[in-house]
Image (spheres, rainbow, N blue to C red):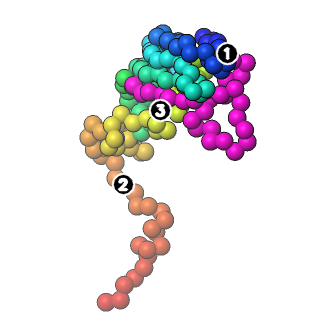
Amino acid sequence: MKIDITNLFNGSNEVIAIDRGIDLSNLQYGGYFPIQNGVSVKGSIYQNAGIVYFEAAVSFKFNGFCDRCAEDIERNYDFSIKRILVSSLAYGDDYDDYIVVENGELLLEELIGEEILFFLPSKMLCKDDCKGICPQCGKNLNLGKCGCKKEADPRMAALFDLKLPD
């Protein structure tokens, strides 16, 4: 969805309300597509003292896999966005708070997709203390211990060969 904000850049006091669902089923995260039921975006775009603001509340359901044990994960996420919209940036400006809107048209799906990718953790875990899977037999260690014998770390082999004086 393209939102024309040219009037706001020209000083208009109108408020552009946003209340829509966005299909981001093609958003890729960690090799899969975790957003199957759409994203809800509610907010507004407005101008105050010559500065154009974008504020929105974003909510979506995440369907994915734990990066340690590969169990299914289903979570609801909510977060808010507050950014300043500009038509261009000067060299050296802090880019974190600004969104450059070329030709006065804000691409809502692109913006929300980028914000979701910044919001999601780099590693998705089923729980904070996930134990993962056994590297030998593949058992999910969250369900209990496996019967595999743990091998010593090969980096420690030289220490095992040391003989201590009597």
Mark 1 or 2, closer to the camera: 1
Q: Mark 1 points at which residue?
A: 6
Is 36 placed left or right of 1 in the picture?
left
Cα distance in 3D space between marks 1 and 2: 64 Å
Q: Is residue 29 a member of the stretch shown in magenta?
A: no
Tell me the quarter of the picture where residue 112 sits. top right
Q: Is residue 6 above or below residue 128?
A: above
Cα distance in 3D space between marks 3 and 2: 34 Å
Tell me the quarter of the picture where residue 52 sits. top right
Is 97 placed left or right of 64 in the picture?
right
Q: Mark 2 points at which residue?
A: 150
Mark 3 or 2, closer to the camera: 3
Query: Over which residues does the magenta segment extend?
Result: 77-105
Which element carries disc 2, helix, strand or loop? loop
Residue at 55% x, 12% y: name it.
14
Residue at 72% x, 38% y: name it.
90
Q: Is residue 84 a member of the stretch shown in magenta?
A: yes
Looking at the rendered image, the quarter that the N terminus falls into is top right
Mark 3 or 1, closer to the camera: 1
